[in-house]
Image (tube, coloured by chain):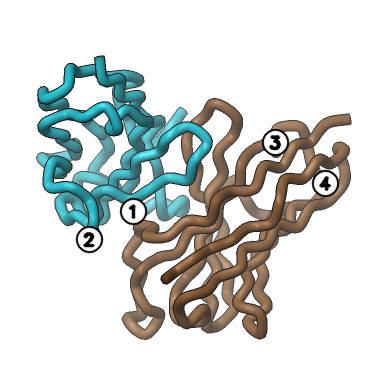
Chain colours: A cyan, B brown
């Protein structure tokens, strides 16, 4: 059981917007802005898409955005494209001895 | 350009040991913490811990103490993950991943900007 809770799957059609949630606790997402999101295509290494809740690394399309409210962080992808189909993982710093926790991952299907 | 290149796939028997390498290039190796992340087949990501490449001091996540050892060879800009007394449940892809905050900030960014390509370790009799 992962420390952060994500929906197992989400789907959307090209051009639409989707949001993936990531629910933590007052020991991680709720109190720290060290929330990041990773995209992973099959057989590939993860790639950071968002860091510190809402910052996009250079080269990541503006279609990807992040936010946080209380204990839940969210990744929104607008203008869905076929290449966005992948697994997405959230991560957060936590005050527990684990230090860094991941969500269980969300499979995004572009219909 | 920053690159992390890991060693190739390994097939080991239960009880054996394995050492995975992660060779860094394109930046000053000793300036950035190196993390290790595990992904079991069909499963999610699991943070294993990190090693301070400036001091050599490792930090292990819960569940990764005892049989797991992080080490360095700074002369060749390489980080290592050694797993001893291998079990079938250690079968996974192991990634090295860099924290982007330089050590002199005396903190971590707690996200990973560059990843190795992953090393599949299979434990089977």
Q: In this view, does B84 lie to the left or right of A62?
A: right
Tag 3 subunit: B
- Spatial CA distance of label 2 from label 1 is 22 Å
- Taking depth in this image into account, of A102 and A62 the one nearest to the observer is A62
- Taking depth in this image into account, of A101 and B101 the one nearest to the observer is B101
Quarter location, residue A89: top left
- Spatial CA distance of label 3 from label 4 is 12 Å
Name the residue carrying label 4.
B85
Quarter location, residue B101: bottom left
Instruction: Give the residue displayed 27% in from the left and 37% down from the top.
Output: A24
Name the residue carrying label 3.
B91
- Spatial CA distance of label 2 from label 4 is 41 Å
Which label's residue is closer to the chain start, 3 or 4?
Answer: 4
Q: Which mark is residue A74?
A: none
Name the residue carrying label 1.
A93
Labels 3 and 4 share a subunit: yes
Name the residue carrying label 2.
A58
Asked if residue A67 shows in the view, the reply is: no
Instruction: For the residues labelled 2 and 1, say whether their Cβ atoms are less than 8 Å apart.
Output: no
- Spatial CA distance of label 3 from label 2 is 34 Å
Which one is in front in this view, the residue at disc 1 or the one at disc 3? 3
x, y percentage for residue A108?
A: 30, 24
Crowding at dot 3, Cα within 10 Å, few <14 / some 14-19 / many 20+, comes out as many
Instruction: Give the residue displayed 17% in from the left and 22% down from the top.
Output: A14
Which label's residue is closer to the chain start, 2 or 1?
Answer: 2
């Amino acid at each position: 059981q992962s420390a952060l809770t994500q929906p197992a799957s989400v789907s959307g059609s090209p051009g639409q917007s989707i949001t993936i949630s990531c629910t933590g606790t007052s020991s991680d997402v709720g109190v720290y802005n060290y929330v990041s999101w990773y995209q992973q295509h099959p057989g590939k290494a993860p790639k950071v898409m968002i860091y510190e809740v809402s910052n996009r690394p250079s080269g990541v399309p503006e279609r990807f955005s992040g936010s946080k409210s209380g204990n839940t962080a969210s990744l929104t992808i607008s203008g869905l494209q076929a290449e966005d189909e992948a697994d997405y993982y959230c991560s957060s710093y936590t005050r527990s001895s684990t230090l860094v926790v991941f969500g269980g991952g969300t499979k995004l299907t572009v219909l | 350009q920053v690159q992390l290149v890991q060693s190739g796939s390994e097939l080991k028997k239960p009880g054996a040991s394995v050492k995975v390498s992660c060779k860094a290039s394109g930046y000053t190796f000793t300036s950035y913490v190196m993390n290790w992340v595990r992904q079991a087949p069909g499963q999610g990501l699991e943070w294993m811990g990190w090693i301070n490449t400036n001091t050599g001091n490792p930090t292990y996540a819960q569940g990764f103490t005892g049989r797991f050892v992080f080490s360095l060879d700074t002369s060749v800009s390489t980080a290592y993950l050694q797993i001893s007394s291998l079990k079938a449940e250690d079968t996974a892809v192991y990634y090295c991943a860099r924290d982007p905050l330089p050590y002199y900030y005396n903190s971590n960014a707690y996200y990973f900007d560059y990843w190795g390509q992953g090393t599949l370790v299979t434990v089977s009799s």
